[in-house]
Image (tube, rainbow, N blue to C red):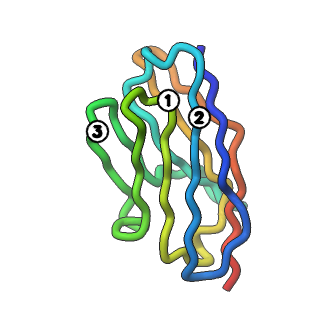
Amino acid sequence: QVQLVESGGGLVQAGGSLRLSCAASGSIFSINAMGWYRQAPGKERELVARITRTGRTNYAEFVKGRFTISRDDAMNTVYLQMNSLKSEDTAVYYCNGESTYRTYWGQGTQVTVSS
């Protein structure tokens, strides 16, 4: 089992920055990749960014050049640095962990960008 706890969300003005953190505990050795997803009201959950244990990253087109995902060496914590935030970035952001056999989710953290 893996537990994921997000932090760092909040209210920010358009153009501002936030840094989200996701702390993983439990069977972290089983995790192959971690990522951030988001879900806005009335919309489906969507991938924002993902990073593998080897450090390979991929980003959704709508955040390229603005968001950066990173992790510590042990994969205990994953970060999402969000710059140049827009009102359309407003959503609940969820941390995700992938193992060979299952996917884990955090409880989510609200990010609200005021225009």
Residue 36 x/y as whole percent: 51, 47
Mark 1: amino acid: Asn
Mark 3: amino acid: Gly
Circle on res. 76? 1
Whether pointer 1 and pointer 3 mark residues with C-beta atoms closer than 8 Å, the reply is no
Residue 59, image quadrant: bottom left
Sooner in the amino-acid sequence: mark 1 or mark 2: 2
Sooner in the amino-acid sequence: mark 1 or mark 3: 3
Mark 2: amino acid: Ala
Residue 1 x/y as whole percent: 59, 13
Residue 5 x/y as whole percent: 66, 36
**Figure check: 58 above or below 17:** above
The residue where tag 3 is placed is 55
Front residue (pair 82, 60): 82
**Figure check: 15 above or below 20:** below
The residue where tag 2 is placed is 23
Q: Quadrant of the C terminus?
A: bottom right
The residue positioned 43% from the left and 15% from the top of the image is 29
Q: Residues within 10 Å of mark 1 (few under 14, many from 20)?
A: some
Question: Spatial distance from mark 2 to mark 3, Cα to Cα?
Answer: 17 Å
